Image (spheres, rainbow, N blue to C red):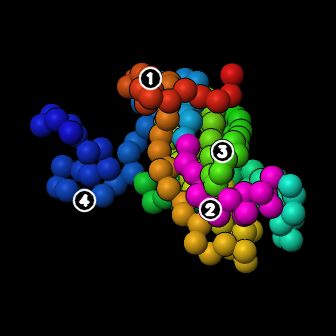
Amino acid sequence: MSETTVLTHFDSRGRTRMVDVSAKDITLREAAARGKVVMQPETLDLIASGGMTKGDVLGVARVAGIMAAKEAGRLIPMAHPLNLTGVNINFRLTQPDTVEIEAIVRTTGKTGVEMEALTAVSVAALTVYDMCKAVDRAMIIENIRLVKKSGGKSGVFTREEEEIWEK
């Protein structure tokens, strides 16, 4: 952070606050986040083959991620409740042992959807863990991060080494 960076969730006396976005312009805003769950290769094989006894792991994780994006404003104290216009959850099974998760969230509004995308990835990953923990308690959820955001006054952020899966 530079010396001129202002932390907007604090007022002039250092007290926490929810930022007032009423003067901001309504623009199309989009954010993509990504994370992964690392597991035993046999666990990944069970997910890929549909052999997990609790059911369709990725299908349930997709719904959980979508639901989580819609709840981010209730879960994160200073996040605004948003009317989301789209949420997509994508998965990649990477041999030998990884489920990669990507969430892309969109809205037309006065504030960004970074927290919604990050929340979606987090809850989708937790759902993968929950549905597979009976066979693999050693799974690791890791590397949850913002990959891209666009819209609003601050413009576009893209994590250099990554591209969005969804086109």
Q: Earlier in the sequence, mark 4 or mark 3?
A: 4
Q: In this picture, which residue range is highlighted in magenta?
A: 34-48
**In terms of depth relative to the viewer, which is nearer, 75 or 126?**
126
The amino acid at mark 2 is: Met
Q: Earlier in the sequence, mark 2 or mark 3?
A: 2
Kindly give the residue lying farthest to the left in the view shown: 3
Q: Is residue 13 above or below residue 100?
A: below
The amino acid at mark 4 is: Arg
Q: Earlier in the sequence, mark 4 or mark 1?
A: 4
Question: Would you say residue 15 is visible in this rendering?
Answer: yes
Q: CA distance from mark 4 to mark 1?
A: 29 Å
Q: How many other residues sit within 10 Å of disc 1, few (<14), some (14-19) or many (≥20)?
A: few
The residue singled out by tag 1 in the image is: 156
> Where residue 49 sits in the image (x, y, percent)?
86, 55
The residue singled out by tag 4 in the image is: 15
Q: Earlier in the sequence, mark 1 or mark 2?
A: 2
The residue singled out by tag 3 in the image is: 94
Kindly indicate whether the residue at mark 1 contacts the one at mark 3 (C-beta within 8 angstroms): no
Residue beneath the point at 54% across and 41% down: 33
Q: CA distance from mark 3 to mark 1?
A: 28 Å
Q: Earlier in the sequence, mark 3 or mark 1?
A: 3
